[in-house]
């Protein structure tokens, strides 16, 4: 009996807003415990949540890039449950009228359908390891803007799930909706998975909560497929339950079963009026969406003549693609900049000498370095070395070249004497050139360059040689 | 001289003429509170020192002739309205020592106006049922007016019980920021005073848009709510719905309200007999919606961030103990009922139906206001004479409709029963039609002579 896994995902993405979703506290990551909260996000009596319009703008952008329908009337609901990380004891979310519905993401030929995307608030953090007697609560994260992307059960293996999450992550980054930093919890994933024989109705599903890396998504799915297959083949029956994944052991553990599931008593939030979105507002938001990776890819290959492979690499990561674009502003030579990124910059990143998220130099300094190499201010062969020194010293390319003596020194006296020598030693080609045979110029140029390598730029050699030949 | 029985309007003239200083006036009230409050318990907390110093501070404004309508005039404020640095307990053990670090929106406005806070008027726990003692405070002269809160009729019932005038403004007129939420879609702050004119003066001061309350509407046209004062009722169309004059209202109340309608007619108003069928279910719909919202709003009191913290080995045990000790039985009953109507399987049968009824009541009222300016009803049903939880649900019958329809409603005294107790009648107006109902109530008050009813 062949069992087919069926997987649906719920992805939580934190929005890149300056302030929280229902108060004006800073939405920056981290901070000392409970320094980024106010009476509002601490649920003091008399405070009333008021909606951050920027968050609505960002979820609309997310919906647009994920091909969703955007509702003209959207409203908020309360999800009621007690937990110490949830100050109001209800989470403001959207059940009945989410902002986005019916979207999809294309993975090659296949489409993964998105059921809905809704806006909600994040909860605080509990710290359990400070004492055996008590837990501590940090509400800095409470009330941060979160979107939840809910897929249809269209995924059938771990690889597909990971590709999907990677793609969502890249698109949200491109749209300036979410920074995608999974290690900071800015993107988290719940996996719903069940197994059934081909053609049979869906099996009993387990939900694995809060996976915060692509690797743990893959491992959790693989483990669940293994566990559920074993259970079914043993003839035992599965129960509908919520499970958590342990990174340490690679296994999943039961948290609660369906019988103990919460009754969230959802109802429309009476504090937050429904929001009516006008077409003109939506159009303005759509117009503000930055260029998506597909468009950039087309521009790189068609206009810049970059190879498909390199364009794929550049656009696969928004930070890299933005870096490339910014470097071009300094030196508009796409092929040269691309080549140096792909061969050298990424090598350093892969060797973990530097991080793309925190490079020790700016894109414009990188562009400047490429410019030096391609305009013969320095030898192209020295570019790697200069970059390495920029990494080590955090100095500008200019000062690295200065201090390291990388500038090509142009000794005009030397150039002239070398060229005089070349003319003297090659009387025949010189005569041919002077008789109008232009093609021998290349030969003479080659002779001179061989002698002057690293000491003069081709432009100077060419200029001097032409002058002398015209004599 | 004793000025404690004066209206807000008269106190303004008295202070401006310097017959008495703001501080002296404040002392008069404080003296009376000292004598009467121990028995009356109208105040949960008296803020004598703060009151005297703010009275002293505003005197210069009065002397300079720069006083606004409420400058130097004392007030009581319901204890479920947040006052910075002063205990705001909401009448609950849960918040017995809670000191908010912020003022409610209305308090900020009153402070700007130079008001003098005498103390926090005692409320039923989270203002659950309708006998706010701020009414008692005003009726015996412990304060010239009070800021009350009205979810299903508390302000209006306080007015009816104590022979006063109480205004529930249109939902959104007055900011809810800083009002401890019971039922967010129904809660409103409003004045309880001696006259409709005073209510209008106070509404002028507390009505402003507040960005901290998304439902806040404020006063975008800068309307003067006293504009209709002393202008009569000629031409006003007053609708009298038959559903409010059935078995659930006692005979003497019915007679008094009908007689009052006739008086208004004689003064030039036009009476219209109407029917608003859905209001028969208003009390039940109100009970379901308000309890549902309250169950959620009161969930934050789990003893984690603030408020009473119980004991227990686990989080679940601890909040159970906190809430068991912190809440009284009426609040617990509402929470249980609210959770019941929102739970799976009950949501559609109860909560959704109540919401649908609310829509229908609104639609009916909209229809009536196409041809009428005011709806006249009794304020209190006879259910208050029987005090069981089930009867208390029905008791809100007269006042719940205006709350559900989010309409302004003023209650004023229209008669005294043979036992001397006052009878209240309610005038409900169009959305944002406070000026019109205050105009009618004011005119009725000017012509009302209690001796006619002896």
Image: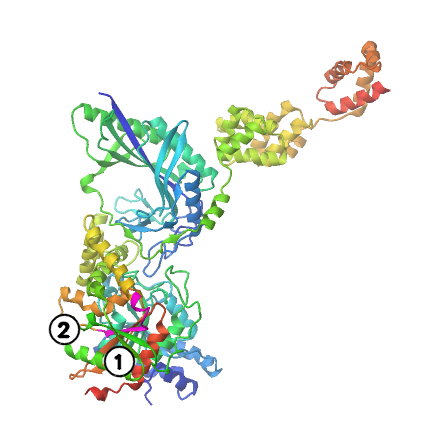
Image position of B449 with respect to B153: above or below: below
Tell me whether the residue at label 2 lies in contact with that at label 1, contact meaning CB atoms closer than 8 angstroms.
Answer: no
Magenta stretch contains residue B287 = no
How far is the residue under mark 2 from the one under mark 1?
21 Å
A204 or A259: nearer the viewer: A204
Location of the N terminus of chain A (image quadrant):
top left
Question: Which image quadrant is residue B437 in?
Answer: bottom left
Measuring from the top left, give residue B4's x and y in whole percent. Answer: 31, 84
Q: Secondary structure at mark 1?
A: helix
Classify mark 2: helix, strand or loop: helix
Looking at the figure, which quarter contains the C terminus of chain A? Answer: top right
Indicate left or right for B297 with B387 as reference: right
Q: Which mark is residue B139?
A: 1
Question: Any magenta on residue B372?
Answer: yes
**Is the residue at mark 2 from the same chain as the one at mark 1?**
yes
Q: Which mark is residue B385?
A: 2
Residue B265 locus on image (x, y percent): 28, 81
Q: Looking at the image, which is closer to me, A445 or A35? A: A445
* Residue located 60% across and 29% down the image: A334
Looking at the rendering, the stretch of residues picked out in magenta corresponds to B367-379
Closer to us: A89 or A454: A89
Residue B27 spot, x, y in % from top left: 34, 82
Q: Residues within 10 Å of mark 1 (few under 14, many from 20)?
A: many
Indicate the chain on which mark 1 is placed.
B
Could you tell me if residue A438 is visible in this image?
yes
Check the image and name the residue furthest to the top: A428
Q: Position of residue A258 (x, y in %)?
A: 20, 39
């Amino acid at each position: 009996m062949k069992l087919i896994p069926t997987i649906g995902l719920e992805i939580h993405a934190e929005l890149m807003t300056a302030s929280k979703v229902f108060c004006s506290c800073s939405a920056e990551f981290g901070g000392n415990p409970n320094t980024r909260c106010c009476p509002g996000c601490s649920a003091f009596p008399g405070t009333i949540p008021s909606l951050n319009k920027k968050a609505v703008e960002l979820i609309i952008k997310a919906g647009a890039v994920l091909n969703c329908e955007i509702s003209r009337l959207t409203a908020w609901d309360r999800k009621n449950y007690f937990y110490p990380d949830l100050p109001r004891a209800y989470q403001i979310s959207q059940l009945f009228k989410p902002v986005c519905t019916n979207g999809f993401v294309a993975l090659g030929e296949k489409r993964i359908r998105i059921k809905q995307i809704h806006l909600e608030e994040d909860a605080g953090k509990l710290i359990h390891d400070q004492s055996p007697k008590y837990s501590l609560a940090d509400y800095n994260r409470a009330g941060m803007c979160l979107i939840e992307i809910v897929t249809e059960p269209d995924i059938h293996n771990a690889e597909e799930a990971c590709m999907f999450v990677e793609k969502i992550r890249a698109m949200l980054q491109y749209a300036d909706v979410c920074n995608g930093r999974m290690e900071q919890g800015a993107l988290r994933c719940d996996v719903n998975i069940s197994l059934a024989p081909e053609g049979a109705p869906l099996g009993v599903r387990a939900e694995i909560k809060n996976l915060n890396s692509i690797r743990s998504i893959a491992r959790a799915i693989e483990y669940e497929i293994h566990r559920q297959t074993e259970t079914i083949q043993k003839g035992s029956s599965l129960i509908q339950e919520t499970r958590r994944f342990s990174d340490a052991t690679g296994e999943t553990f039961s948290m609660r079963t369906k019988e103990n599931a919460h009754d969230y008593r959802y109802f429309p939030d009476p504090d937050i009026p429904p929001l009516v979105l006008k077409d003109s507002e939506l159009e303005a938001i759509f117009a503000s969406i930055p260029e998506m990776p597909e468009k950039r890819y087309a521009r790189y290959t068609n206009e810049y003549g970059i190879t498909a492979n390199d364009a794929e690499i550049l656009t696969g990561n928004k930070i890299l693609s933005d870096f490339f674009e910014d470097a071009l502003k300094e030196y508009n030579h796409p092929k040269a900049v691309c080549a140096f990124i792909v061969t050298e910059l990424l090598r350093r990143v892969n060797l973990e000498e530097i991080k793309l998220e925190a490079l020790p130099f700016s894109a414009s300094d990188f562009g400047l370095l490429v410019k030096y190499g391609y305009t013969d201010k320095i030898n192209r062969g020295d570019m790697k070395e200069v970059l390495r020194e920029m990494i080590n010293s955090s100095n500008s390319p200019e000062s690295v070249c200065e201090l390291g003596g990388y500038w090509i020194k142009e000794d005009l006296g030397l150039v002239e004497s070398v060229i005089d020598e070349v003319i003297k030693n090659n009387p025949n080609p010189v005569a041919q050139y002077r008789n109008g045979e232009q093609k021998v110029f290349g030969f003479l140029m080659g002779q001179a360059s061989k002698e002057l390598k690293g000491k003069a730029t081709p432009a100077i050699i060419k200029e001097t040689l032409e002058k002398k030949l015209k004599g | 001289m004793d000025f404690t029985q004066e209206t807000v309007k008269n106190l303004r003239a008295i202070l401006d003429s310097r017959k008495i200083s703001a501080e002296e006036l404040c002392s008069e009230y404080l003296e009376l509170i000292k004598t009467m409050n121990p028995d009356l318990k109208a105040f949960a907390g008296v803020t004598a020192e703060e009151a005297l110093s703010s009275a002293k501070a505003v005197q210069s404004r009065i002397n300079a002739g720069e006083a606004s309508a409420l400058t130097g005039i004392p007030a009581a404020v319901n204890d479920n309205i947040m006052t910075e640095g002063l205990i705001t307990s909401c009448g609950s053990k849960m918040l017995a020592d809670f000191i908010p670090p912020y003022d409610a929106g209305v308090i900020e406005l009153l402070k700007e106006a130079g008001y003098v806070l005498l103390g926090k008027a005692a409320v039923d726990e989270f203002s659950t049922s309708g006998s706010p003692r701020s009414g008692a405070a005003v009726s015996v002269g412990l304060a010239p007016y009070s800021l009350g809160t009205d979810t299903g009729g508390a302000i209006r019932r306080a007015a009816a019980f104590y022979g006063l005038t109480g205004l529930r403004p249109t939902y959104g007129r007055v900011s809810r920021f800083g009002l401890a939420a019971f039922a967010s879609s129904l809660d409103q702050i409003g004045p309880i005073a001696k006259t409709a004119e005073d209510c209008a003066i106070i509404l002028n001061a507390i009505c402003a848009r507040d960005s901290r309350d998304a439902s806040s509407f404020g006063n975008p046209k800068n309307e003067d709510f006293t504009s209709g004062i002393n202008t009569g009722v000629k031409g006003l169309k007053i609708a009298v719905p038959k559903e409010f004059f059935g078995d659930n209202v006692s005979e003497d109340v019915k007679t008094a309200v009908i007689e009052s309608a006739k008086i208004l007619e004689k003064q030039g108003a036009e009476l219209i007999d109407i029917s608003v069928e859905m209001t028969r279910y208003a009390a039940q719909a109100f009970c379901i919606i308000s309890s549902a919202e309250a169950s959620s709003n009161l969930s934050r009191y789990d003893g984690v961030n603030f408020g009473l913290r119980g004991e227990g080995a686990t989080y679940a045990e601890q909040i159970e103990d906190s809430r068991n000790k912190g809440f009284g039985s009426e609040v617990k009953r509402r929470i249980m009922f609210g959770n019941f109507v929102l739970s799976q399987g009950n949501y559609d049968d109860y909560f959704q139906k109540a919401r649908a009824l609310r829509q229908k009541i609104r639609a009916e009222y909209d229809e009536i206001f196409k041809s009428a300016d005011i709806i006249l009803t009794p304020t209190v049903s006879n259910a208050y004479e029987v005090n069981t939880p089930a009867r208390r649900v029905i008791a809100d019958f007269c006042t719940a409709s205006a709350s559900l329809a989010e309409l302004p409603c003023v209650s004023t005294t229209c008669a005294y029963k043979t036992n001397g107790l006052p009878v209240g009648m309610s005038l409900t107006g169009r959305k944002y039609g406070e000026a019109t109902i205050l105009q009618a109530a004011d005119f009725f008050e000017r012509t009302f002579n209690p001796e006619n009813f002896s």
